[in-house]
Structure formats: structure tokens, C-alpha cells
Image (tube, rainbow, N blue to C red):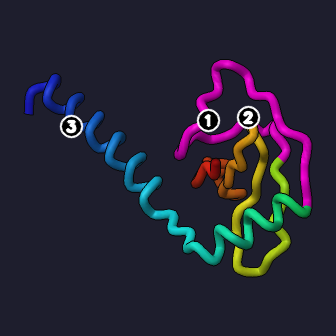
Amino acid sequence: MPMHLKAAATGLLVAFAGSAFAQDVVIVPEQETVIREYVVKHPVNPVVVDQGVDISVGTALPEAIELYPIDEPQIQYRYVVVDGRTVLVDPGTRRIVRIME
């Protein structure tokens, strides 16, 4: 396979892997309700992120950003508040899995 086709194929695989990651996270409506209620009852200070950090699903947050636990047994994610939005994060990878408006 020519080099430029290999590079294109690699790029497609990376893009697919990122989109597959975003689609793997399923939060059912009941869980979303629990999360919203928890965040309202347990407010945290919003974080300010550097302009170079893209707040979107799949982005890994820097270690400097504190992640807050959701003390509910059926919720495995942590959260932060950025620009008035609740951002759910996988604590193992620090990747954003959901942004709740």
C-alpha cells in the first residue's frame, strides 16, 4: 500500500476510534436525572480551563483539574462544571464522556 494511503487509513482509524469511544457511553434518562439532582444538591466551584483545552466528548482533561465524585452507586463517572455545563468524566482516563447542558 502506498505511504499516503497508509497515512489516510491510519487517520481514519484514529477518527473512528474517537467516535466509537463517544458512542460507547450510554447514560439512561434515570441516571441523567440522578446526576442532575446530585449536581444541584452538591454544587462545586466551576473550573476555568486554558484556551488550548477543548471541552468536548473524548477530550482528556489535565491532571490539574479536580474531578468531583458522584456519590451514587449506579454512577461511575466524576464531574466538573465548565461554563455552566456539567461535564462527566471517566476517572480512569480523565476523558470527557458527556456534556450536560
From which residue to which does the magenta span run?
A: 42-66
Residue 83, disc: 2
- Mark 2–mark 1 Cα distance, whole angstroms, equals 10 Å
Which is nearer the eye, 35 or 72?
Answer: 35
Dot 2: few (<14), some (14–19), or many (≥20) neighbours within 10 Å?
Answer: few
Callout 1 secondary element: loop
Q: Quick check: marks 3 and 2 in contact, CB under 8 Å?
A: no
Which is nearer the eye, 39 or 22?
Answer: 39
Q: Main secondary structure of the magenta part?
A: loop
Q: Quick check: marks 2 and 1 in contact, CB under 8 Å?
A: yes
Q: Quick check: marks 1 and 3 in contact, CB under 8 Å?
A: no
**Residue located beneath label 1 in the image:** 55
Q: Quadrant of residue 77?
A: bottom right
How far across and down, in percent of the image, does residue 24 sit?
45, 63
Callout 2 secondary element: loop
Mark toward the viewer: 1 or 3: 1
Which is nearer the eye, 59 or 47?
Answer: 47
Q: Amino acid at mark 3?
A: Ala
- Magenta segment: does it hold 49? yes
Q: Amino acid at mark 2?
A: Asp
In this view, 78 is above or below 9? below
How far across and down, in percent of the image, does residue 52 sit?
64, 20
How far across and down, in percent of the image, does residue 96 sit?
61, 48
Q: At 82% from the left edge and 66% from the top edge, which residue is drawn?
A: 38
- Mark 3–mark 2 Cα distance, whole angstroms, equals 36 Å
